[in-house]
Image: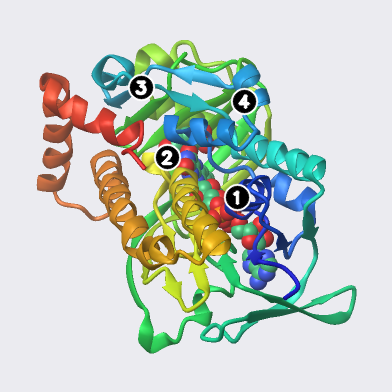
């Protein structure tokens, strides 16, 4: 056998799994389609649940996060003049950490370099074989040459468009999907945040989110029609739309500047079951996608990694397979709860094109209930800071 675990995908899931396994003495090979620079240039998640923060520390990659990350105690949920503050710390005793996925990924690459783990970049034509045999194999092309690696287990950490999920026979998997009729246009701009906590803002004009990366770098989003492209959105158009959608008190403080990144992401909920087929285990976006409204995607990928790493160690050390047998059900139970929360947040905070007046009233009543009920705020807070692993 060439290695114990082949990890397909060098995004946050694959790198964190490699980091945890190698620290426990397990040999792995990571296969990544893109260059490291390309992986690091993707601007994505910004909010880490406290369980994620703790796992990153346990994996030996928490030092820079603890220096540069911004712990947040709460966030605002608003609709025009109705502004609800949810104090996560007060309601749950927990915070979240504002720290970008790009930074998490960079910390993981640095730690992997220090450990001297094996990561092959720019591989193509990845195929997975013999998943029902004692020993499996992964084939790929690197520098124009075909290669084959044999292993005990394969971790499919290759994201929504990867090949791992498709290695499970179509008649053995089931998928659940909801595609929302809008996307988020996100910009990065080197300006000070409009507010010291995040603002999730609904309005008659649609949704906007004010997030940040640090004291002079903001990440702001606006809901856009699926048909829009980045070319439709000049910086001026972005700022005037964003300003209109956030509460007036915040708009009065808004400092604008040039965008240094701009991209559009469609919103989707998706789950593929089961997460295991023979020696293959799906992790993160390879198995499930949530709309970003609940800030759950990266955090769910991390909880999958936690369950799988804890199951692989006894399997490889002593042949104890109980954890691996339970992985799919165990992870899916948490995944479905995050699916529900992300769907509910998306429904509460977005204007749906063609919706009737009743739908708008339901949204407003949900927010108004949140303003009045500590129980409702605690429920939101408990989900936002992350359900226990
Ligand atoms: P990734 O990050 O997609 O990484 C998969 C890696 O696999 C590689 N790959 C392959 N490699 C080899 N062979 C193949 N055939 C391959 N096919 C693909 C890819 O190149 C890539 O490097 O999946 P992973 O690791 O599971 O991580 C998931 C997270 O990236 C994702 O869930 C989050 O970014 C979602 N997300 C958010 N999550 C949060 O927890 N909090 C947030 O605040 C948050 N905000 C967001 C988000 C996602 C967004 N977008 C753009 C989708 C905001 C946005 C706008
Ligand atoms: C981000 O900072 O990119 C971010 C924050 C919260 C979300 C989604 C994205 O819900």
Determine the CA span between mark 2 and mark 3.
16 Å
Q: Is residue 377 left or right of residue 234?
A: left
Kindly state the secondary structure of the residue where label 2 is placed.
loop
Which badge, 1 or 3, comes first in the chain's sequence? 3
Residue 182 versus residue 161: which sits nearer the camera?
Answer: 161
Mark 2, other Cα within 10 Å: few <14 / some 14–19 / many ≥20: many
Which badge, 4 or 3, comes first in the chain's sequence? 4
Residue 40 in view in this figure: yes
**How many numbered badges does the structure rendering display?**
4
Callout in the foreground (4, 2): 4
Q: Residue at x 43, y 64 (%)?
A: 324
Mark 4, other Cα within 10 Å: few <14 / some 14–19 / many ≥20: many
Q: Which mark is residue 230?
A: 1
Q: Which mark is residue 65?
A: 4
Q: Are marks 4 and 1 in contact (CB under 8 Å)?
A: no
Q: Is residue 275 left or right of residue 113?
A: left
Say whether mark 2 is within 8 Å of ligand 2. Answer: yes
Q: Are marks 1 and 2 in contact (CB under 8 Å)?
A: no
Mark 1, other Cα within 10 Å: few <14 / some 14–19 / many ≥20: few
Residue 214 drawn at (x, y percent) = 61, 20
Q: Are marks 2 and 3 in contact (CB under 8 Å)?
A: no
Label 3 sits on residue: 94
Determine the CA span between mark 4 and mark 3.
17 Å
Kindly state the secondary structure of the residue where label 1 is placed.
helix
Label 2 sits on residue: 295
Q: Residue at x 43, y 57 (%)?
A: 289
Tell me: residue 145, above or below residue 268. Answer: below
Callout in the foreground (2, 3): 3
Mark 3, other Cα within 10 Å: few <14 / some 14–19 / many ≥20: many
């Amino acid at each position: 056998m060439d290695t114990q675990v082949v990890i397909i995908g060098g995004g946050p899931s694959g790198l964190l799994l490699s980091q945890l396994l190698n620290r426990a003495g397990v040999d792995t090979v990571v296969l990544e389609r893109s260059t490291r620079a390309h992986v690091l240039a993707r601007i994505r998640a910004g909010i880490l649940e406290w369980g994620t923060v703790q796992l990153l520390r346990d994996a030996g990659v928490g030092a820079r996060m603890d220096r540069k990350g911004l712990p947040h105690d709460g966030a605002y949920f608003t609709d025009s003049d109705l502004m609800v503050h949810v104090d996560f710390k007060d309601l749950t005793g927990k915070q979240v950490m504002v720290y970008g996925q790009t930074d998490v990924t960079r910390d993981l690459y640095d730690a992997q370099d220090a450990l001297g783990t094996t990561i092959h970049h720019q591989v193509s034509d990845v195929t997975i074989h013999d998943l029902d045999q004692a020993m499996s194999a992964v084939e790929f092309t690197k520098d124009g040459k075909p290669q084959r690696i044999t292993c005990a287990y394969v971790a499919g950490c290759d994201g929504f468009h990867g090949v791992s999920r498709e290695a499970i026979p179509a008649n053995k998997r089931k998928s659940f999907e909801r595609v929302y009729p809008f996307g988020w246009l996100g910009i990065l701009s080197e300006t000070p945040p409009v507010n010291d906590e995040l603002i999730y803002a609904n309005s008659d004009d649609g949704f906007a989110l004010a997030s940040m990366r640090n004291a002079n770098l903001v990440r702001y989003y606006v809901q856009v029609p699926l048909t829009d492209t980045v070319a439709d959105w000049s910086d001026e158009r972005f700022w005037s739309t964003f300003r209109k959608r956030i509460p007036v008190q915040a708009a009065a403080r808004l400092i604008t500047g040039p965008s240094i990144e701009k991209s559009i992401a469609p919103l989707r909920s998706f789950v593929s079951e089961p997460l295991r087929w023979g020696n293959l285990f799906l992790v993160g976006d390879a198995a499930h996608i949530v709309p970003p409204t609940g800030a759950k995607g990266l955090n769910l990928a991390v909880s999958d990694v936690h369950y799988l790493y804890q199951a692989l160690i006894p399997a490889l050390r002593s042949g104890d397979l109980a954890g691996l047998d339970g992985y799919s059900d165990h992870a899916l139970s948490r995944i479905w709860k995050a699916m529900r929360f992300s769907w509910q947040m998306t429904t509460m905070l977005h204007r749906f094109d063609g919706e009737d007046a009743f739908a708008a009233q339901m949204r407003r009543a949900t927010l108004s209930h949140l303003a009045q009920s500590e129980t409702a705020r605690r429920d939101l807070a408990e989900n936002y800071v992350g359900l226990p692993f």
